[in-house]
Image (spheres, helix red, strand yellow):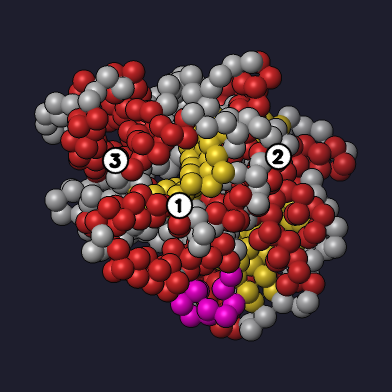
Amino acid sequence: MPNRPYPLLETINSPAELRQLERTDLQPLAEELREFLLRSVATTGGHLSSNLGTVELTIALHYVFNTPDDRVIWDVGHQTYPHKILTGRRERMPTLRQLGGLSGFPQRTESEFDAFGTAHSSTSISAALGMALASKIKGEERRAIAIIGDGAMTAGMAFEALNNGGVTDCNLLVILNDNDMSISPPVGALNRYLAQLLSGQFYAAAKNVGKTVLKGAPPLFELAKRLEEHAKGMVVPATLFEKFGFNYIGPIDGHDLDSLIPTLENIKHLKGPQFLHVVTKKGQGYKLAEADPVAYHGPGKFDPAVGLQKSGAAATTFTQVFGHWLCDMAAADSRLVGITPAMREGSGMVEFEQRFPDRYFDVGIAEQHAVTFAAGLAAEGLKPVVAIYSTFLQRAYDQLIHDVAIQNLPVVFALDRAGLVGADGATHAGAYDIPYLRCIPNISVACPADEDECRRLLSTAYAQNHSVAVRYPRGAGAGVAVSESLEGLPFGKGEIRVRGQKIAILAFGTLLYPALKVADKLGITVVNMRWVKPLDQELLAQVAREHEALVTVEEGALMGGAGSAVLEALQTLGLVLPVLTLGLADQFIEHGDPAKLMALQGLDAAGIEASIRARFAHLLPVSSLAA
């Protein structure tokens, strides 16, 4: 990042120092913070639009409240970079989302100012309520503050927390950061309700008539201006939130420090549950991000003076393979419907929405609803495809069992971001889907090794009369050309890719390709298993009988994973031979470069080779031992 003076920002290493500033210094500080933030994210990559939108709100919160004693909980965490910068982490921003560096999300182990770790949506109100009640029980005077976006408010969990919090008398403040934008454009009746009320003819007309009538009487006009925010409560969602038991205040301009600070100072002295509605703009202060907040939601490195540029022909990603398959299969079968829980862009469904709008359903940040909604569609003979990140399907586990599997309904789960996800870290890693899926009856799990297999296994999954999950990683794979055919692969069958001696690697998913490199050096067998469930027991038995040892490799949790499935199957088959299982260790793996993380887990070619040499050196030919 270029050296540039930030005379106010460079004096702030904690909120305590921020609170020493004069009020007149806060707007210049906001301008410095916004520029620093833009240059920082342009250098490292990361979340931008959402963070530009919370600069003034962050300053106001830390200026008014006694953080960290007052607890501030940021929902999701996409908007916490200004918070990190103002809480002593400014100089570490060049390490953002890198191995050993700052997390892209709030993290309790990183700072005392990160009161609660968040990265999945819609958890903040529940956590803040727990903290507020804990303070009351312990007899401590402090405020718990949850900042939640309008997109995150589409999740049922947020309303469960409001329903619970409104009947307490604890000092809870919920701030609705209303920027009319989640990662994908927000959807649903609640969003429409907010938008219609704030932009409705009745409110606009009433406001304009009042200004016209009172303009000639300046004292009355000034009084009306002061009462305007209270009048809004008659026609905006005050009734909705007050029915939950909250004192509703707003909406106010989230970029106007002269509104934010006095309002927060007043709220600070109120008792009981409070709800503040703040309107902000994603990308605020950077015209390119304001114009296209989705593109600038999570950009890589770029030049702020130029903006994002289209790169040359990039490798086809698994997400793109899914998106193309979805459109092709929808064209071939009118029963197909596509479902996403607010991840249209991330899951590769933009083209599908454009081509098949009547069969595209964005249900908002509501994974539980997405799964049961799919079950209802399947029960009526349609063929739902749920495009969902592996880490987000965890949020709908009961629905997966109770509403889909028990009823044996044919739902296809396209599990994006399976395995490690690099800079997003442990909260977004799809490490657990193999263990949590393979134990459920009536659900099968496929692990494509490359882009073409991904398309073909999606077709296989779609053809089944029960649920099938197809798991694939973030980004591109081995670069295998993708067929345009919709023909599938044999259900539950793997293949031997390379025949060698004594040792066989059983590869699940994209780790097939590093396994092939290892086999080339060691002269051993490699099997592309393709399916975790059903496991190809016929092929497994054949390979086990022809070799003296087996090695399983998977980009997923080792405990309960594909390796465990192999061990269980060998026991059932009555076959006894040494098995080395390689996968993700029993730990939460931090953020960082994906290749480095895989190497640290011993799951790159060098790591797999080293593990095999360490365990089975006696089975390797002398020539390979010397290599």
As rendered, which of 211 and 482 lies closer to the eye?
A: 211
Task: Check residue 230 in the rendering and tell me which mark sits there, or answer none.
Answer: 1
Label 1, residues with CA under 10 Å away: few <14, some 14-19, many ≥20: some
Task: Check residue 167 in the rendering and tell me which mark sits there, or answer none.
Answer: 2
Compare marks 1 and 2 and give the one earlier in the sequence. Answer: 2
Q: Residue at x 36, y 40 (%)?
A: 260
Which residues, given as a range, are shown in magenta?
Answer: 352-361
Drawn side of residue 569 relative to residue 7, left or right: right
Residue type at mark 3: give it. Asp
Residue 561 seen in render = no
Q: CA distance from mark 3 to mark 2?
A: 32 Å
Drawn side of residue 303 relative to residue 318, left or right: left
Residue at the top extreme? Answer: 139
- Where's the C terminus, which quadrant? top left
Residue type at mark 2: give it. Val
The correct choice, above or below, for 14 with respect to 412 in the image is above
Query: Can you identify the residue that label 3 sits on?
Result: 258
Label 2, residues with CA under 10 Å away: few <14, some 14-19, many ≥20: few
Q: Position of residue 153 (x, y in %)?
A: 56, 52
As rendered, which of 43 and 159 lies closer to the eye?
A: 159
Q: Give the secondary structure at mark 3.
A: helix
- Write down the quadrant of residue 140 in the picture: top right
Q: CA distance from mark 1 to mark 3?
A: 17 Å
